[in-house]
Structure formats: C-alpha cells, structure tokens
Amino acid sequence: MILAIDIGGTKFAAGLVSAAGEVVAAERVATPRDGGAETLWEMLADLVEPFSADVKGVGVGCGGPMTWPAGEVSPLNMPGWRGFPLRARLAERFPSVPVRLHNDAVCLAVAEHWRGAGRGSANMLGMVVSTGVGGGLVLGDRLIDGGTGNAGHIGHVVVDPEGPPCGCGGRGCLEAVARGPGLTAWALAQGWKPATYGDAHDAGPYREDREVTARELARDAAAGDEVAMAAMRRAGTALGVAIASATALCDLDLVTVGGGLSQAGELLFGPLEEALRGHARLDFARRVRVCPAELGQDAGLVGAAALVLAEERYWSAG
C-alpha cells in the first residue's frame, strides 16, 4: 500500500492506495482557516497516523506555489505554511520509503491519465476548474514537469489581454476569468441575485452579506437565469480559447476537465466546445477531444500515489 496525501485550501485528505490505483481507505478533514505552521503539521500528522504502518511509499499532492522537487510549500490558501519543508518533514517521519510531492493539480491530471478518463491517451492535458484553474501535462505517455515543476499551468494562459486582473499580477489569465470566485463576482456585478443561498439543506433567501458560490451560479443558470447563463458562457468560452492554444502548442489528443465548475455540464462544456472548434482550425488540432474528469474526490489521492506506483511515467526527480 501507498500512503497518499492530498492537501488543499478546503480539505486535507489521506488514505491508502493499492497497486491497482484503488483507494481502499481514506479520511478527510477541513483545512484550518488560521492555523500556524506547526498546527497544520500536527493536524496532518494525526490524519496520516492510522495509515502509517507498513506503507511502501508516500505520495503527496499539495496546493502551490512550491519549490519542486524539494517540496517546500507555500499554498496560497494556507498562510500558515510559507516555505514549509513538507517533503523533508514527511521523509523524517517515513525514513525508509520514497516520499514524492507534486502540485495538487498535477496529481489530479496524473490520476486521470493513469486510472481515469485519460487512460490510453499518450498526449493529454488534465485541468482543474474550481477556486483556481490548474493543470498537468502528459506528452509521450509521461508527465512533463518543466524547469520548475510547473508545466501544464494553463490557468495563466492569457485569454483576454484586456480582461480582469489576475492574482499572479497579470491580466486576462484564464484563471482570472473562469475560476469560481471570479465568475460569481462578475455575475454579481452584472446584477445576478442568487435564487437561494447554500446547498439544498441550507437553502434560503439571498442576502448581500453572505458569500455565494459557483455551485449556486450553475444552479441558477440551469434554471434559466440570463446573467448566470452568461457567466457560464463566459467561463466556457475562455476555457475553449485556452485549450485551443494548448492544443496547437502541444498536439494534444485529449483534455480532461475536473473541479467543481465542471459539474455544470453542458452549461460549461457547450460554449467550451463552440470556442474550441472556432479556434482550433489546423487539421491536427481538430482531433482533440474534451471530456469531464472521472475520478471525483479520490483523484488527488490516486494521482499522489501514482508518483510512487508508476514512477517511470510520473516521477523524473530524485
């Protein structure tokens, strides 16, 4: 068994993954909003403890930025970790087995290539569209890391040079346009007022002092709200333009799209396909297929485990 760890701004997850890529046991806890470095580490240590016996390796996906492959992490949504030596700390705890760490979006892409919608594709881009937009790139049936481990970071492909400012300091990046919080902010500025707040068990009237989510936006779009529908078209179009550019550059067979926003279905994938087909005009680019990711909440753990279990394809560092 491989101990797999998935660390993000919303949750910490840990579990055991078999050689076949199946999650056989897992636990998840909410990420603390204001934890310091050691508080976060202790919470992670407690989470992995039940899965620590007789593991053959440790694979980790973590939000970035990070130094790779050293694994010093500074997740944007976790201010308690800045330059935190996560890989080294885990290596101290598990001294006799390999410990590998990569960006969480890369791990999601690896999971889809290894055991999900990308099986059988030698050249694919795996994307995550959620609070942020990230990705991982597989060419020639191998993960491409790039010079700093950030290859495939499609969220910072520019889709509109005059578009909104991005957290990276640029303007008009795909992430600035299509990430969930940016999309809801755009819709609110256009006059959208959500029909309900929260999930079904917590639904209630919209109040301006409550944070709204992309899930609510997608729900209202499905119900026919014109502004919500326009927001989904805006995101889908931006994704299609970015994928067309990536396809022309990398000669892709397949793009998988996961993350919370992908659950909007045709509301997102319809305008995505329209924009993609309008911009991918070269013969070789027209063959690219786009499909939803398959593995859901287990993808991060499966991809992290693959850094160890399928190292010949997904791990190139020492």
Image (cartoon, rainbow, N blue to C red):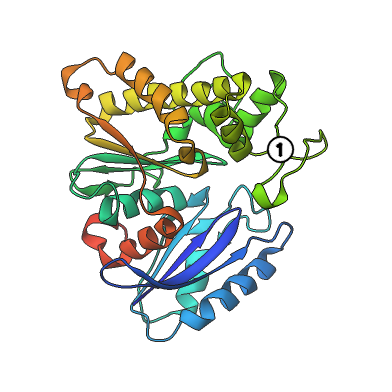
Identify whether 256 is placed above or below 277. below
Amino acid on which the number 1 mark rests in the picture: Thr
Nearest the eye: 263 or 60: 263
The local secondary structure at tag 1 comes to loop
Q: Position of residue 84 (x, y in %)?
A: 58, 61
For residue 117, side relative to residue 105 (left or right): left
Identify whether 131 is placed above or below 47. above
Nearest the eye: 167 or 281: 281
Number of numbered discs overlaid on the protein picture: 1
Q: Tell me which corner region of the image, top left, top right, bottom left or bottom right, holds residue 205.
A: top right
Q: Residue furthest bottom?
A: 53
Q: Tell me which corner region of the image, top left, top right, bottom left or bottom right, holds residue 218.
A: top right
Q: Residue at x 32, y 38 (%)?
A: 291
Nearest the eye: 226 or 61: 226
Q: Position of residue 12 (x, y in %)?
A: 56, 63
Q: Residue furthest front?
A: 223
For residue 7, side relative to residue 40 (left or right): left
Residue 158 seen: no
- Give the quarter of the figure containing the N terminus: bottom left
- Give the quarter of the figure containing the C terminus: bottom left
Q: Residue at x 32, y 15 (%)?
A: 279
Residue 283 seen: yes
Q: Position of residue 16 (x, y in %)?
A: 40, 74
Q: Residue at x 31, y 73 (%)?
A: 18
Neighbour tally class for label 1: few under 14, some 14-19, many 20 plus, Cα within 10 Å: some
Q: Which residue is mark 1?
A: 196
Q: Position of residue 231 (x, y in %)?
A: 57, 23
Q: Residue at x 41, y 43 (%)?
A: 150
